[in-house]
Amino acid sequence: MYIEKINLTNFRNYTKQEINLNKNINILYGNNAQGKTNILEAIYLSGIGKSYRTNKDKELIKENEEFTNIEINFQKKDRNGKIFINISDKKNILVNDIKIKKMSDILGNINIVLFNPDDINIFKEGPSRRRKLLDIMISQLRPAYLYNLNMYLKVLEQRNNYLKQIKYENKTEEMLEIWEIKLAEYAEIINLYRKEFVEKIKEKITKNHEKITKNKEKIKIEYISDFTNKEEFLNKLKNHRKIDIIKGFSGIRHT
Ligand SMILES: Nc1ncnc2c1ncn2[C@@H]1O[C@H](COP(=O)(O)OP(=O)(O)OP(=O)(O)O)[C@@H](O)[C@H]1O
Ligand SMILES: [Mg+2]
C-alpha cells in the first residue's frame, strides 16, 4: 500500500497544499516549524480517524478558519482508494466518497505505523502504553478486535456504575455476575487477538533486529498478561467484589 497524494486545505499551517509522494521511501525535510510533522499528523488522521497529538479536532483547523479538509489518495495491491475528512463543528469522514457511519470504519484503509521520539516511552512507561500500541496496530488489521475492545470497556463501565449503586443505593451484589461473565468473555477474545498479533510480528522483529545489530544481539518479544483463562478471570473478579464495592470501581482490569 502507498499514498499517492495528499491534499490539505486549512490544515494546521497549510492554507492549500498538494503533496505528491512516491511509492517507496519519502523524506520530508525543511526548517523548524515549517510543517513536516503536520503532514505526518494528516496522514495519521486519515488512517486512524484522530490525531496522535491532540484530542481536540478544532486544533487541526488553521487559525482563523472555519473548517479543514484532508484528502488522501492511496493505492493498494488490488484497488485504489480515497479518504476525505472534513472538520468544522463536527467531523465527517468519507471513504471512497461514501460517508462512514462509525469512526472505526476508517480503519484498515491506510495502514499506519507511527514511530516518533516519544515512542521510546513504550519501553520506559507502564504496560498501558504498550497495550495502547497493540490496540492501534491490531484494530487496523482486524476490525472485530476494536469492537470487542470497545464492548469490554463499555461493560467495565457498566460494572463500575453498578458497584457505585451497591455502595450508595444498597443494590444486591449478585447482579454483578451479569457484567462479570461478559467481561471475562471479551477479555478472552482480546487476549487471543493480542497473543496472535505478537506471535505474528515476533519473527519479523527478530529478523530485523539481527540485521540491525549484525547478529550481536538477540531480541525477545513476548505478550505477558495476567489473563490465563475465562474461568480464572471470572473468579478473580468475584474475589475482588468486596474491595471493588468499597472503592466504587473495578480493581482488576485486563486492558
Ligand atoms: N491550527 C493551526 N493554525 C495555524 N498554524 C498552526 C496550527 N497548528 C500548528 N501550526 C503551526 O505549524 C507549525 C508547526 O508545524 P510542525 O510541527 O509540522 O513543524 P515541523 O516542520 O515538524 O518542525 P520541527 O522541525 O520543529 O519538528 C508552527 O509554525 C505552528 O504555529
Ligand atoms: Mg516536527
Image (spheres, helix red, strand yellow):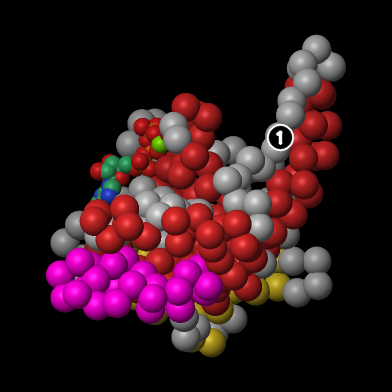
The question of residue 57 being in magenta is answered with: no
Q: Specify start and end residues of the magenta stretch as a single range.
A: 159-183
Give the percent coordinates (x, y) of residue 73.
Answer: 60, 68
Give the percent coordinates (x, y) of residue 98.
Answer: 53, 87
Residue 67, visible in the rendered structure: no
Give the percent coordinates (x, y) of residue 3.
Answer: 63, 59
| Residue under the image location 71 percent in, 66 percent down | 75
**In the drawing, does residue 219 fall left or right of residue 28?**
right
Which quadrant of the render holds ligand 1? top left
Residue 51, picture quadrant? bottom left
The residue where tag 1 is placed is 221
Q: Of residues 28 and 196, which is closer to you in this image? A: 196
Q: Amino acid at mark 1?
A: Ile
Residue 53, visible in the rendered structure: yes
| Residue under the image location 74 percent in, 66 percent down | 76
User: Quadrant where the N terminus lies?
Assistant: bottom right
The question of residue 167 being in magenta is answered with: yes
**In the drawing, does residue 179 fall left or right of residue 60?**
right
Q: Of residues 210 and 192, which is closer to you in this image? A: 192
Q: Of residues 236 and 116, which is closer to you in this image? A: 236
**In the drawing, does residue 101 fall left or right of residue 148?**
left
Residue 166, picture quadrant? bottom left
- In this rendering, the answer to whether 202 lies above or below 23 is above
Helix, strand or loop for the magenta stretch, by majority: helix
Which SS class for mark 1? loop
Q: How many residues crowd around disc 1 within 10 Å: few (fewer than 14), some, or many (20 or more)? A: few
Number of numbered discs: 1
Give the percent coordinates (x, y) of residue 148.
Answer: 56, 71
